Amino acid sequence: MGKVPVIKDLQLTTYFQELAADSVYPSAGSSAALTAAHAAALFAMACRVNLRKIREGLPAGKGNNGLPVFWQETLGKAELLLEQTLALAQEDGFAVKDFIEGVPRGAERATTIPLQIARCAGEIIILTRDALPKSYVPVQADVECARCLAAGSKQAALTVARYNLPLLDQDKRESYADQISKLDQDGARP
């Protein structure tokens, strides 16, 4: 397969050129992870705007029903999910490389990583749902868009995992199929 590009070092144009190239990485798994990263970054921006608007509107030393703490904690979670999903986009490349090169457990990693991406996307969905009603109205569209991106990422990651099931030994398929089914049902409401 050759060298795996370092996703975080690529400019957007270069990433999309790499994605469009005749190669196996980046591909579906990294796309799902970067979509989740996009969702987390957009949501982090909305958290920062909410924090700024609260700070601008509150007299010094007063709380606003715990909203500053809520937004600060939520921002921390969004930033952590951003880091995790960027790392998973890269790990997907290593897993694909391992599978192609016949490394033991390569197929399992190529299935495990999409499930991790789906879990991160699910966490973003939950954060955005909790945050939307508390959000400053002009950034509610950003929060909702982040949720939509995360939902697409989750479904894409689960699709990758489903397609990778036949690559696994028979004894592992059922366990992974169960994980996929559970993740697919978690937070199924739009």
Image (cartoon, rainbow, N blue to C red):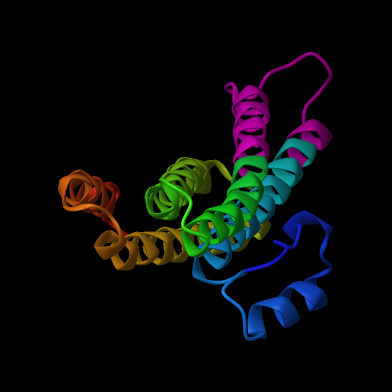
Is residue 183 inside the magenta stretch?
A: no
Instruction: Give residue 117's position: percent from left, percent from top.
Output: 48, 50
Q: Which image quarter is the C terminus in? A: bottom left
Secondary structure mostly seen in the magenta stretch: helix
Of residues 44 and 59, the one nearer the viewer is: 44
* Residue 36, percent from left and from top: 56, 56
Q: Using the image, determine if residue 8 lies above or below residue 126.
A: below
Percent coordinates x, y for residue 127 in the rendering: 49, 41
Q: How many marks?
A: 0
Residue positioned 57% across, 60% down in the render: 97
Q: Is residue 161 left or right of residue 136?
A: left
Eyeballing the image, is 45 above or below 55? below
Q: Which residues are magenta?
A: 53-81
Q: Measuring 42% from the left and 51% from the top, which residue is drawn there? A: 118
- Work out whether 160 lies above or below 80: below
Q: Is residue 61 above or below residue 25?
A: above
**137 sits left or right of 96 in the view:** right
Q: In the drawing, does residue 90 fall left or right of residue 183?
A: right
